[in-house]
Amino acid sequence: SAATFAAPLDLSRVAVPPGDGALVVIDPGHGGDEVGAAANGVVEKDSNLEMGRRVERLLAQAGYRVLLTRHDAGRAVADVDGAGQPQGFSAQRRDLQARIDLANAAGAAAFVSLHSNGLNDPSANGIETYYNAARPFSAQSRLLAQTVQGNVIAEMARSGYRVSDRGTLDDACLRAFQGVCFPLFVLGPPRVTTRDEVLRRGGDPATLGFAAGQDAIASRATQMSGVLVELLFVSNPDDARLLADDGAREALARGVVLGVSRFLAEQPR
């Protein structure tokens, strides 16, 4: 069995200068009715939140300020603004926009969304990190993705865990619908959404912020480098065992922190 390393992050070992108080927003993916992937005893929304707390603890030890987009099993700030509880597309879209707005209002230096993958194919396994090439900060986001991905893979190997390196991926056209490219919302550039599009996708324009008679609204993008890291596949039995292993989870969290801190150490403020 793999060795267990739950020791605190040793900054002298990794030659990362302590943070200078820069703010990092950590987004534990999903929450509330949005469960994410669930298989092999792992529920993604809960796993993401626990991982977010680990990353928060280690980043704070390294001298960074940290803001989590959610602190419990519920949604992010979108649930507490008195606008009710929309369902489906509208609820998800509003929740994700609220996470972006939170990072922008706080003036974060980096935005990192934590997820784990799930597929119908149980053989799919490993770790991958997404960035968006079709938006501002694309070069920095790509570098952040490469740095996080490389450090997570290296930290898992150093800690005795074998995982597959699926690399860094551009999500600019992750999904195509009716000839239009759709990226991951939290990483994408600003885009205009029409009332007709919301209705076609089963959403409620009012809960998305459409005023009476308004034909379109524009989303807001993060104003800093952003990535989304998929930490293993809950649908793969071996990956799921790692996600249930405290030592492996701590190594994953260390890798994320090392990647973020090394990226920020090289970015001019």
Image (spheres, rainbow, N blue to C red):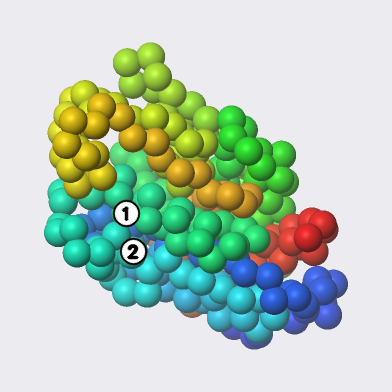
Task: Classify mark 1: helix, strand or loop.
Answer: helix
- Count up the numbered dots: 2
Q: Which disc, if any, is residue 1?
A: none
Task: Classify mark 2: helix, strand or loop.
Answer: loop
Residue 171, placed above or below residue 234: above
> Where, quadrant-wise, is the N terminus in this rendering?
bottom right
Residue 17, placed above or below residue 199: below
Sequence-first disc among 1 and 2? 2
Residue 242, placed above or below residue 122: below
Tell me which corner region of the image, top left, top right, bottom left or bottom right, holds residue 181.
top left
**How far apart are the two marked residues, 1 and 2, measured between alpha carbons?**
6 Å
Residue sitting at x 74%, y 58%: 263
Query: Callout 2, which amino acid?
Result: Ala
Q: Nearer the viewer, residue 236 or 84?
A: 84
Q: Nearer the viewer, residue 219 or 226?
A: 219
Residue sitting at x 19%, y 64%: 82
Residue to which mark 2 is pinned = 76
Residue sitting at x 45%, y 44%: 220
Q: Are marks 1 and 2 in contact (CB under 8 Å)?
A: yes
Q: Badge 1: few (under 14), some or many (20 or more) residues near its Cα, within 10 Å?
A: many
Residue 268: give x, y in percent of width and height: 82, 57
Q: Which disc, if any, is residue 95?
A: 1
Residue sitting at x 48%, y 26%: 173
> Where, quadrant-wise, is the C terminus in this rendering?
bottom right
Query: Callout 1, which amino acid?
Result: Asp
Residue 176 seen in this snapshot: yes
Residue 189: give x, y in percent of width and height: 52, 36
Residue 113: give x, y in percent of width and height: 49, 56
Residue 91: give x, y in percent of width and height: 23, 49
Judged left or right of residue 267, residue 114 is left
Q: Nearer the viewer, residue 187 or 242?
A: 187
